Amino acid sequence: MYNVDRSSKQQFYQSKEWVQVRNFKRVANPYCEICERVNGLIVPMSEVDHIQDIDELPRSRWLEIDNLQSLCKPCHSAKSITRHKQKVKEAKDNQPSEEQKILLKAFGLLGAIPTS
Ligand SMILES: [Zn+2]
């Protein structure tokens, strides 16, 4: 776990490098990747999301294109909520539930979480 403070995150999201990478991703995949993968739906994306949270990555990996996915707004919010719930649950018993595992898998997060 990397302790990333709020202001360096803000700085990052305003940086020229991030804006360039984000724009590249928007053009490379203008559709929501979760809607497509889970439901076979073609939905225009609205956010470029870090698959693995930048809190969990060294600064040098924040711009990795392989760690980015295009998401629509509802999927982006769903991911944030799931992540939040998962963190709360992890704090409780250290294990994601079966239902959460399905969601986490859909969000490409399962590998990022220790499951034993
Ligand atoms: Zn979506």
Image (spheres, grey):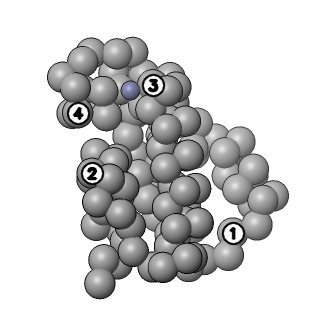
Which label's residue is closer to the chain start, 1 or 2? 1
Residue under label 3: 72
**Residue at 64% from the left image edge and 41% from the top image edge:** 16
Q: Label 1, secondary structure: give it.
A: loop
Disc 2 within 8 angstroms of ligand 1 (CB): no
Label 1 amino acid?
Answer: Val
Task: Tell us which disc is closer to us: 4 or 2.
Answer: 2
In this rendering, the count of numbered labels is: 4
Mark 1 → mark 2, Cα distance in angstroms: 28 Å
Indicate the quadrant containing the N terminus: top left, top right, bottom left or bottom right: bottom right
Mark 1 → mark 4, Cα distance in angstroms: 31 Å
Which label's residue is closer to the chain start, 4 or 3? 4
Mark 4 → mark 3, Cα distance in angstroms: 13 Å
Q: Residues within 10 Å of mark 3 (few under 14, many from 20)?
A: many
**Residue at 45% from the left image edge and 79% from the top image edge:** 94
Label 4 amino acid?
Answer: Val
Task: Estimate the x, y position of residue 8 in percent, counting from the top left.
Answer: 75, 60
- The answer to which image quadrant residue 115 occupies is bottom left
**Residue at 39% from the left image edge and 74% from the top image edge:** 95
Which label's residue is closer to the chain start, 1 or 4? 1
Task: Tell us which disc is closer to us: 3 or 1.
Answer: 3
Ligand 1 placement by image quarter: top left
Position of 42 compared to 64: left or right? Answer: left
Residue under label 4: 38
Label 2 amino acid?
Answer: Ile
Disc 4 within 8 angstroms of ligand 1 (CB): no
The circle on residue 4 is: 1
Which label's residue is closer to the chain start, 4 or 2? 4
Mark 4 → mark 2, Cα distance in angstroms: 10 Å
Label 3 amino acid?
Answer: Cys
Q: Label 2, secondary structure: give it.
A: helix
Are circles 3 and 2 on residues that touch, CB within 8 Å?
Answer: no
